[in-house]
Amino acid sequence: MNKSSIEHQLADIRRQLSETESLPLPTLEIIGQSQQERYWQSLLVYFLDPDSPHGFGSDVLTAFLEAISSHPNIAFDTPVHDATRVTIQSEVPTGSGPVDLLLALDDEWFLCIELKVASPETGDQTVRYASAPTIGDIVVSEHAGTAEYVYLAPETAQAPSSEEFVDVSWRHVVDQLEDVLHDGQGQYPAKSSAQLADYLDTIKRTLNMTNLDGISTETALYTEHFELIDQLTEAYEADKQRLFQALEEAFFAATDVDPADWTVNNRGTNYINFYKNAWQNLDTGTSIEYEPHVHLKRDQPRIWLRLDIEHGNKQTIREEFRALLSDEELATLEANGWDIVDGTYAYFAKSVPIDFESPNESVQRATQELHQLGTVVEPHIDEVAAAHRHE
């Protein structure tokens, strides 16, 4: 099937979707602003603030905090006995751009929240926010309470660049906020209840979360066009696999790399990693490796290069490694675009764009970046690893 035929069939699918009978439209959809992040943010802040004249008091805020704390990847589980003490700020300065939302309760905890609707993350902004020394009036290093970084986004969104941010879906939050309306029916001003319902309806419709009776139009279209969709999916996965294979070949094509010294683990659909055997299973339970990830489902396809120092007492290894890096070496890495992310897995990271017209050139550049990183860091990694070998 040629490109023109595929585009024609996809256009037909889009046309059929647009002709689907619609429910009454929420306000933001009527004015053509249903995907504008700033409006979602403004409305959320309005409903969360107990001092706003909506009549919900702190009920919406309490439900929102319960939704966040109930997420399986969130460590924030501090009960809020008096939600009116929670401060709520939007567009909070960090020194590296404003974060969308900051909730805090004295010195007990804070939630740094980045909201996404339709647009992807801009320039690895979550990496900057996670490493920011201050968020508004909060000095992160001096904060003794719980700190959580939340990436509130659609279920289909690409994961945040920073591993410090926990990916929480809008669906997870909406389900909890709807309970406010259901459980408090008749307790709140009718206009405010209608406004909150309209806001939640905007979220559900925009992110295709509305539950309808019967089989959805989307499912019916998938059934009708499954051969085309499967063909596109298979081509996508095959191209991704070829990119990983090309990364492996390009990595070992360097003249100063002896394949006998390295182990490669090619996961195909997720990532590939390279490591010397001496870098694994240190006496701290820590492993060190290069781990490129390929991201194609985004407006800016990229190869996300990482030097991972992970597992066990990784902080000891990271501190010893960092102590060996000279200021000049660190400045060189930063000048070449490497960021110290110091995340759950990654220590250094860099993004290399993928050119769909010349993917091999992108792969070559990515492996060159890894080897240039290696000339600086590998002697230090070897030294640290040697000091922590199992006897």
Image (cartoon, grey):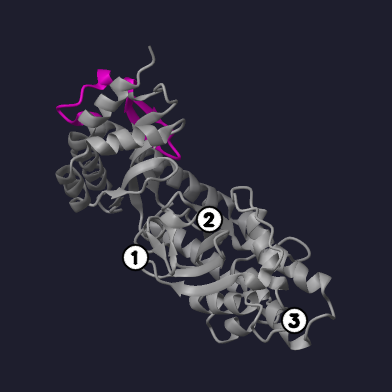
Q: Residue at x 53, y 83 (%)?
A: 32
Q: Nearer the viewer, mark 2 or mark 3?
A: 2
Distance from the alpha carbon under mark 1 to that under mark 2: 18 Å
Closer to us: 142 or 219: 142
Segment tinted magenta in the rendering: 252-278
Q: Amino acid at mark 1?
A: Ser
Is residue 169 covered in magenta? no
Q: Amino acid at mark 2?
A: Glu
Residue marked by disc 1 = 96
Total numbered labels placed on residues in the image: 3
Residue 148: give its label. 2
Query: Is the residue marked by circle 1 packed among few (<14), some (14-19), or many (20+) residues within 10 Å?
Result: some
Q: Does the CB distance between marks 1 and 2 fall below 8 Å? A: no
Question: Which SS class for mark 3?
Answer: helix
Q: Is residue 262 visible?
A: no
Residue marked by disc 3 = 193
Q: Residue at x 66, y 73 (%)?
A: 84
Question: Which SS class for mark 2?
Answer: strand
Q: Residue 209, how many percent across, how many down? A: 66, 64
Q: Residue 43, how many percent across, how many down? A: 59, 79
Query: Is the residue marked by circle 2 packed among few (<14), some (14-19), or many (20+) residues within 10 Å?
Result: many
Of mark 1 and mark 2, the one earlier in the sequence is 1
Q: Residue 214, how many percent across, how many down? A: 77, 62
Looking at the image, which residue sits at the far top? 391
Q: Residue at x 51, y 69 (%)?
A: 101
Q: Is residue 242 visible?
A: yes
Q: Is residue 124 left or right of residue 179?
A: left
Question: Which SS class for mark 1?
Answer: loop
